């Protein structure tokens, strides 16, 4: 495979080309309105997202990270509180906990799903535990049944990190609608992506929604009447308008991702050294992440030389990051640590064609066989 036929890990062009007239119209509509902050596009998108998710409130904000942070603030979490979460996630999950002054407690993940292991979450509960923050990693729903049972038994709050799972479902109900709050990211690479940073908080709790709305606007419910130390975390009108164009297509795009994942599974079936992910109900495959034998980093480099781009999510578990080196030096999460040395995310987008997937698998299998 030559450098001229490089296969990217993600190609947004087909999606943008198909929707270009509508997106252009939406952007022009915002420009002509001269209303750029918390205007009619944001309100309309919040209403449409709430209907899609089946919740009372959807509150737009600047990013998925801010959604997590403000949700924890709205619950009143702070110094002295512990929040149990996964070490196998993007840093923003743990960072949000630390930002409010609480302590992230890392429970190890399940070997197959790569999501929080409920049995290990239960072992991690202490008198200081106030909440559980599960992540629906790569678009695969967590075991919410067991996690919600644990939360109820121990009177804990649940904030769902749905940064990679907009449209995913657990027992035919959207992720992000089980806990007190669900947090979503619309970073451009997400299944539902904006053209910049954007996020959302979903909840059925009127008081929590009111808190998040105030926090995103400098702690004010009425302009110039600030009641708390808040933030400037408002969803831009441009991003809301673009997301409104895209939202009606999300289910079709997620179905396309599942078809791509199923095809990968068939193509990889004869390559026992490469461990493919399960295709389970509700999974929307934000990433298609395989596990490979030792030497993953060199394998990734050789694939790049062959023209196949891949990504590693994530090379370091959160409890081993430098920022937590002192406070979590003794944490034991062997599964997460093992995964960090094995995972490799292959190219995936809804329109990915079979011949391209076949080329990816041929290159991957050849390089694994070569050692």
Image: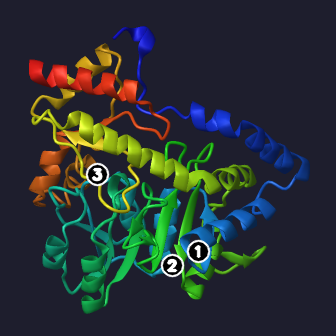
The residue that label 3 is drawn on is 323
Residue 165 at x, y = what percent? 43, 58
- Say which quarter of the image contains residue 300: top left
- Please name the residue that numbered disc 2 is placed on: 74
* Mark 3 residue crowding within 10 angstroms, few (<14) / some (14–19) / many (20+): few
Q: Do we see residue 351 in this rendering?
A: yes
Question: Is 124 on the left or on the right of 158, as rendered?
Answer: left
Depth-wise, is mark 3 or mark 2 nearer the camera?
Answer: 2
Packing grade of label 1 (10 A; few <14, some 14-19, many >=20) is many
Alpha carbon distance from label 3 to label 1 = 27 Å
How far, Cα to Cα, is label 3 from label 2? 25 Å
Disc 1 is placed on an element classified as helix
Mark 2 in CB contact with mark 1 (< 8 angstroms): yes
Toward which corner of the image does residue 220 lie, by quadrant?
bottom right
Foreground residue among 275 and 83: 275
Q: Which of the 4 image quadrants contains residue 154?
A: bottom left
User: Residue 212: which numbered mark, if any?
Assistant: 1
């Amino acid at each position: 495979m030559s450098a001229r036929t490089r296969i990217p890990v993600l190609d947004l062009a087909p999606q943008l080309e198909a929707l270009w007239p509508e997106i252009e119209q939406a952007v022009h509509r915002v420009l002509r309105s001269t209303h750029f902050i918390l205007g009619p596009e944001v309100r309309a998108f919040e209403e449409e997202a709430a209907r899609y998710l089946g919740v009372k409130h959807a509150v737009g904000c600047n990013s998925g990270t801010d959604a997590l942070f403000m949700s924890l603030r709205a619950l009143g979490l702070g110094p002295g509180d512990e929040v149990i979460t996964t070490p196998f996630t993007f840093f923003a999950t743990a960072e949000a906990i630390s930002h409010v002054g609480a302590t992230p407690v890392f429970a190890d993940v399940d070997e197959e799903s790569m999501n929080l292991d409920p049995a290990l979450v239960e072992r991690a509960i202490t008198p200081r535990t106030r909440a559980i923050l599960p992540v629906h990693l790569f678009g695969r729903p967590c075991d919410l049944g067991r996690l919600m049972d644990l939360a109820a038994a121990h009177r804990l709050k649940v904030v769902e990190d749905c940064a990679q799972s907009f449209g995913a479902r657990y027992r035919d109900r959207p992720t992000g609608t089980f806990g007190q709050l669900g947090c979503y990211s619309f970073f451009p690479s997400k299944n539902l992506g904006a053209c910049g940073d954007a996020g959302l908080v979903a909840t059925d709790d009127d008081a929590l929604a009111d808190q998040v709305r105030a926090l995103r606007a400098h702690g004010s419910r009425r302009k110039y009447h600030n009641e708390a130390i808040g933030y400037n975390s408002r969803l831009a009108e441009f991003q809301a308008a673009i997301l409104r164009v895209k939202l009606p297509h999300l289910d079709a795009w997620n179905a396309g991702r599942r078809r791509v994942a199923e095809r990968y599974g068939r193509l990889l079936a004869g390559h026992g050294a490469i461990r493919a992910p399960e295709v389970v109900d509700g999974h929307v495959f934000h990433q298609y992440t395989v596990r490979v034998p030792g030497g993953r980093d060199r394998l990734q480099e050789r694939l790049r030389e062959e023209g196949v781009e891949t990504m590693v999510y994530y090379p370091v578990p959160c409890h081993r990051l430098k920022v937590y080196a002192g406070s979590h030096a003794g944490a034991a999460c062997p599964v997460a640590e093992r995964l960090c040395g094995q995972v490799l995310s292959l190219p995936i987008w809804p329109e990915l064609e079979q011949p391209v997937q076949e080329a990816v698998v041929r290159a991957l299998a050849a390089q694994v066989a070569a050692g």
